[in-house]
Amino acid sequence: MADSPAATPNAVAPVEGAGAPLSAGARHWTISGVSSAALAPLNSTMIAVALPEMVRDLHVGSTLLRHGLVTSYLLTGIVLQSLGGKLADRIGYGRALRLGQLVFALAGLLGFLWPAAGALVAARVTMAAAGAVIVPSALALLRNQLPPERRGRAFGAFGAVMGCSAALGPKLGALLTEHFGWRSIFLINVPWLAVSAGVALLAATEVRAQQARRGRFDLLGSLLLGASLAAIVAGSVAPELRVWMLVGTAGLIGFGFWEKRASDPVIDLRLFARRVFSAGALVIALQNLAMYTLLFELPQVSARLFGSSRESVGSVLSAMMISMVITAPLAGRLSERFGARALTLGGCLSGALGIVLLGVLPFAQLSAALPGLILLGLGLGLASAPAQAAAMSAVPREQSGMAAGLTSTLRYLGGVAGLAILGGIQSDQHDVAIVLSEHHNALWVFGAALLAAAGCAALLPARQQTETAR
């Protein structure tokens, strides 16, 4: 593939629909339509609050239903992100986005119309697969249809919508379940996806990578990647399956050797040779290791120390999410002016300082965590959009979907790695001294992850990237 755009670091692959600059109106519709696709995480968090009612109505064990509806959704999403991005590179980003939205809506309609355990699991797995196409396609569209000086605010808006939808999911799910029954959680996907698809149709024209050579679809590489990631995730969530993490790691090594031989690989490993892409992707992964693991760890610590309810813990954690949602769009705009390095580095260090506050302030009551959580949220919001924009701008246009899928996969794997580490730290003890010691050990891990992210941020460009700055 010596003549392909990917073979020369500074080349820009021709992309259909990306030649002419967009008008202000077209940019508005593009950002609005694509950002609305970021509501996909809404469904992943809504269903958690409805599980008790579903167990009662379906007469299914709670553990079985939780794994069938929640764990399977997470696992499918992780496994298929990179494949979804590759699919978007092949068929077109707008087309892939609309296909994912259609499948997501139809799967939600199936869950509403067929309230049986097996059908609901099938619906959830299908929704996760569709979401794995939606997010990379949306990110690739933003990268291809917007000039570099406009991408920061677009990625900021996308990240803000994703964070807001994840934070609002439990509250909206509780409201829908209380007033309309748990089946409405599946039906709510249909109207918002219809609106999202309608707005997206008003955006700019189709964008599709025009690759110099395109081999046959890499089926073996896809199977190797999917099976390896599935083994790693299964081993991280179930202690009795920890050996599968080693199997999955070995599978990824084999996947790497195979991808070097494939004519049209699922993941072009040369992307990791691009310093800016690797640094931005690692910032995203390490941030999510700290954030999502803290979202899991703090409720458990609060329950063991204070007997705090889910509602009270959720209210405190919402301070972090609100800070992120407010800061992310602002960071996107500022990165267009000052570049990614300063904002991402400052955000990572601010987040690390928030972790320090969580560790040094007396944890005598749950509200004592608020200052640290707010500072952590501000830091995460400052760093996420510039890091994502820098990573996406560092790859050739023809590989935008692949790059978006890969960053999404790393985002998930960061959270999975954090949960696996947390599982080795926490115990079932309720002694105050032991609980606080475990909490501080977890904070050391979170802080170290954010400091490592700061080190990666130092490798990002100091100024706004151009199309040829790789």
Image (tube, rainbow, N blue to C red):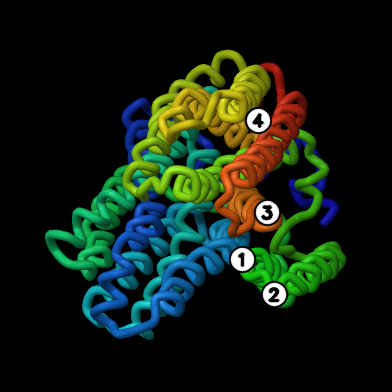
Do residues under tags 4 and 1 come within 8 Å of each other at their CB atoms?
A: no
Residue 78, relative to residue 290: is it above or below? below
| Residue at 34% over, 72% down | 107
- Tell me whether circle 2 and circle 1 mark residues in contact (CB < 8 Å): yes
Q: CA distance from mark 4 to mark 2?
A: 45 Å
Q: Position of residue 411 (x, y in %)?
A: 60, 48
Residue identifier under label 2: 241
Front residue of 76/62: it is 62
Residue 262 located left or right of residue 319:
right
Callout 1 amino acid: Val
First in sequence: mark 4 vs mark 3? 3
Numbered badge on residue 237: 1
Q: CA distance from mark 3 to mark 2?
A: 15 Å
Residue behind mark 3: 417
Q: Which residue is mark 4?
A: 467
Nearest-to-viewer mark from 4 and 3: 3
**How many numbered discs?**
4
Q: Around disc 1, counting alpha carbons within 10 Å, would you say few (fewer than 14), some (14 to 19), or many (20 or more)? A: some
Above or below for 388 versus 119: above
Residue at the extreme top of the image, as rendered:
338
Helix, strand or loop status at disc 4: loop
Disc 2 marks a residue whose amino acid type is Leu
The image shows residue 213, relative to residue 306, as above or below, that is below
